[in-house]
């Protein structure tokens, strides 16, 4: 029996700072219903999908930062997503800022969850590769303070059985790291769900700004092909509080080909029929890990970064 999953990538246009959760959830519901109408059994929303991309601002008061976080999931504001998913019988993936209280301590993560067709949370991933910097840098046209506002994820790169296959999640900057994709690949992942917020400008190396869209697709296509997996990558796009975010949401086949791609910088749904059995064309041959990997030569990959490189990184500005 074919293992085909119809997946929707629900790109979002910008969310301005004054827009509340309720208005954003309304937009997500519109996209979810559209996905259902187009035959999807899973709809994927972006990273930090409930608010504007707040790491672009330095906020000295923790209360101000915490207003962007969710202490409960679902909460009264997000509950309608869970109710509608159950009513429609559609799964969804959602990125949000997670605040967890453990005794007296508070932990904050950049998180994504997978919710099944009955409205139950079945998977959680906390972003591991946090880009940017941890203190105010006045030279920047906008800040990228993920290292200040989040701690690195503590759940590893889990996979789970869902939608007839093996599903994994990455968040934004993770997609640029072959190690992150490979750890999922080694667990037999067949469908990787990724949300992102990527500024169109790269102020630390401005000459690379013209390549931001290219590097997005390069990373996604390489991750898909080298691990024989479908990839669903979903942007929050457009001009958000004066800062341009790229679009380019896409669905990539296990051969590394983009089979659906967003054309706007607004709320836009794209869909694809993902035949999970096509993963075997890659996993069983060119990237047959059991036959062809040589892990005895890969020790450096999982060792701490060599001292020489750490020293040279410190000479430049932390990116
Ligand atoms: N959200 C996120 O991870 N964005 C980064 C921007 C990199 S520039 C600091 C990304 O990799 O797309």
Image (cartoon, rainbow, N blue to C red):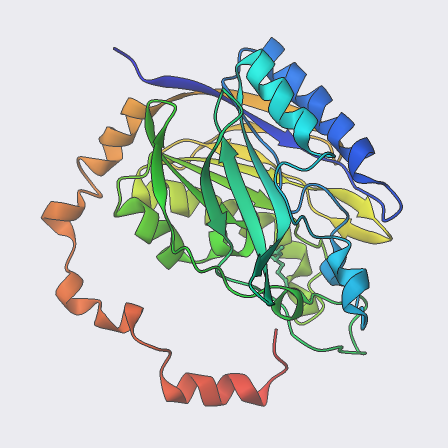
Q: Quadrant of the C terminus?
A: bottom right
Q: Quadrant of ligand 1?
A: bottom right
Q: Position of residue 49 (x, y in %)?
A: 68, 41
**286 over 85 or under it: above or below:** below
Q: Position of residue 34 (x, y in %)?
A: 66, 15
Q: Is residue 22 left or right of residue 89?
A: right
Q: From the viewer's side, name the closer residue of 18 and 299.
A: 18
Q: Residue at x 85, y 49 (%)?
A: 17
Q: Residue at x 22, y 43 (%)?
A: 287
Dividing the picture into quadrants, the one containing residue 207 is bottom right
Dividing the picture into quadrants, the one containing residue 54 is bottom right
Q: Residue at x 50, y 53 (%)?
A: 126
Residue at the limit of the structure toward the front, as seen here: 103
**72 over 68 or under it: above or below:** above
Q: Quadrant of the N terminus?
A: top left
Q: Is residue 144 left or right of residue 298?
A: right
Q: Position of residue 109 (x, y in %)?
A: 57, 57
> Can residue 294 be seen by looking at this rendering?
yes
Q: Is residue 281 left or right of residue 69?
A: left
**101 over 187 or under it: above or below:** below
Dividing the picture into quadrants, the one containing residue 298 is bottom left
> Can residue 255 be seen by looking at this rendering?
no
Q: Position of residue 128 (x, y in %)?
A: 48, 60
């Amino acid at each position: 029996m074919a293992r085909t999953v119809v997946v929707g990538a629900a790109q979002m246009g910008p969310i301005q700072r004054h827009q509340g959760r309720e208005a954003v959830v309304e937009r997500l519901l519109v996209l979810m219903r559209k996905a259902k109408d187009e035959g999807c059994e899973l709809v994927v929303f972006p990273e930090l999908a409930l608010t504007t991309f707040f790491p672009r601002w330095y906020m000295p008061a923790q209360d101000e930062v915490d207003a962007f976080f969710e202490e409960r999931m679902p909460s009264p504001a997000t509950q309608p997503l869970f109710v509608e998913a159950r009513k429609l019988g559609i799964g969804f993936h959602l990125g949000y800022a997670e605040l967890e209280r453990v005794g007296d301590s508070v932990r904050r993560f950049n998180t994504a969850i997978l919710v099944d067709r009955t409205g139950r949370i079945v998977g959680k991933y906390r972003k591991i590769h946090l880009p940017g910097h941890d203190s105010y840098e006045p030279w920047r046209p906008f800040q990228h303070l993920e290292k200040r506002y989040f701690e690195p994820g503590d759940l590893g790169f889990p996979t789970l059985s869902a939608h007839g296959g093996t599903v994994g999640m990455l968040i934004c900057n993770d997609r640029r790291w072959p190690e992150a994709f490979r750890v999922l690949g080694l667990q037999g992942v067949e469908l990787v769900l990724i949300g992102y917020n990527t500024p169109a400008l790269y102020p630390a190396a401005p000459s690379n700004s013209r390549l931001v869209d290219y590097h997005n697709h390069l990373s996604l296509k390489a991750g898909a092909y080298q691990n024989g997996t479908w990839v669903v990558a979903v942007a929050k796009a457009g001009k958000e509080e004066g800062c341009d975010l790229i679009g380019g949401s896409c669905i990539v086949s296990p051969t590394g080909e983009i089979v659906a791609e967003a054309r706007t910088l607004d709320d836009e749904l794209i869909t694809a029929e993902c035949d999970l059995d096509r993963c075997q064309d890659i996993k069983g041959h060119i990237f047959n890990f059991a036959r062809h990997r040589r892990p005895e030569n890969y020790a450096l990959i999982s060792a701490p970064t060599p001292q020489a490189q750490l020293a040279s990184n410190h000479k430049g500005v932390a990116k």
